[in-house]
Image (tube, coloured by chain):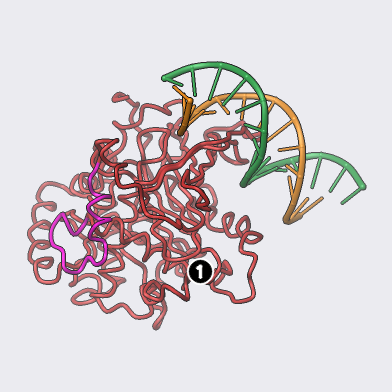
Chain colours: A red, B orange, C green
Amino acid sequence: MSARPPPPPRPHLALPPRSAAESLFTGAGDASPGPLTLASALFPSHADAGCGGASSGASGAASFTQLLTGSFAPQQQQQRQHEAAERGRGGGVARAGPALSVAPPASAASGASVFTVPPGLSPSGLLDSPGLLFSPAMGGFGMSHQQALAQVTAQASHSPLRMFDHIEQPSFSAAAASSGALQHMNSSANMTGMPDMAITTANNDNASLQSAEASQRYQVNAPVDKPADDGYNWRKYGQKVVKGSDCPRSYYKCTHPNCPVKKKVEHAEDGQISEIIYKGKHNHQRPPNKRAKDGNSSAADQNDQSNDTTSGLSGAKRDQDAIYGMSEQVSGLSDGDDMDDGESRPHEADDADNESKRRNIQISSQRTLSEPKIIVQTTSEVDLLDDGYRWRKYGQKVVKGNPHPSMLVGNAF
DNA sequence: AGCCTTTGACCAGCG
DNA sequence: TCGCTGGTCAAAGGC
């Protein structure tokens, strides 16, 4: 488990065409990319990873924090830490690592919350990272988005490989981390004054809830083939190899009675979770004792208890809280912004029908930037990622064909 | 004993 | 209409 072959060299961040990246920043009044969104582009997925490493993974994964810190040269890192410290003190704004980047055009355009986190990265870690991309100064105060993007890009290019050299942060589940990062992102967005952010919709619980499902994608890198512990209980009910992907996609249902939430977990070739798609909304609370059982991150529980707001929190605690609250906001983002997918369309009652399309679109766009990711499809600002629920696997299937491991990802371009 | 995973088969949507 | 693909079901087995 610890010795997973080093991932192949990752390509430097290639900023998406203007429509993707720049449009986000320059767009007048349009949704601004969240920290994670930005980060996603900076963490290109390693398509080449092999499925065989399914259970190994951890070594290749790195916590967001680690990645972020590692992505800088020592001097740079130090300086950035210092800068971040100064910037961050005041606002407690969400902090993103250097890896932040712009979501793919489709995602951005649709407003769906797509967050790409490199394998093993912990969003929370990202937030904590000294290299914080979205410090107030950068995100909305002293630095323009374009500048921030440029900086991030530059940073990423400095040490693309190092970002992946770290071990995954054990305390947080990938999903949880993702969600946390997302929430944090939203927080920062608010604080930075980004207009028209999904946050707005996130706050609108009722509207979002009633709207069709929103799809949320998170790129997370989990070292194990099972989805990260998001606090919920899941049952695997199927597995299939989807076309274009070497590794099977696993289908999970929330084990809670009558809970409609499902999630799909795709693995990278190296066995790490490359993509997690949450669908639906939990109609119940997270199992309280889930954490105790796992002995794993208390973040979920803590967040659960205090996820009402992240604003009043500080430090790591706040990050953790952000993790769980984030999913909700993320949902909101999706709902509000994910117009293209029809989530917010009044006419599209049957979001189910559109799910496949939506999914395809999102996935395509995601893969262009990076591989590992978590996708959440939810009806609203649910805390899907927040999972404290249980999921049980009740099926698995291998779909015909995908013979070629090496290809998949990233080649959407 | 209960829960979960695995696995093959079935069904529905789409081109 | 057919084939392909994704998603789900349900039996069997394991923990």
Point 57% across, 66% down: residue: A341
Give the residue displayed 24% in from the left and 67% down from the top: A309
Front in this rendered view, residue B3 or A279: B3
Identify the magenta region: A297-319
Residue highlighted by disc 1: A338
Question: Image quadrant for the N terminus of chain A?
Answer: top left
One can see residue A25 in this view: no
Three-letter residue code for mark 1: Asp
Q: Is residue A393 above or below residue A350?
A: above
Chain of the residue where label 1 is placed in the rendered structure: A
Q: Pinpoint residue A259: horizontal percent, then vertical percent.
A: 50, 52
State left or right for residue A207 relative to residue A92: right
Q: Is residue A260 left or right of residue A374?
A: right
Instruction: Identify the image quadrant of residue A183.
Output: bottom left
Residue placed furthest toward the bottom: A28
Query: In x, y percent, where is residue A152?
Result: 27, 59
Q: Position of residue A120 (x, y in %)?
A: 31, 41
Judged left or right of residue A102, residue A152 is left
Residue A190 percent coordinates (x, y): 27, 75
Q: Nearer the viewer, residue A137 or A305?
A: A305
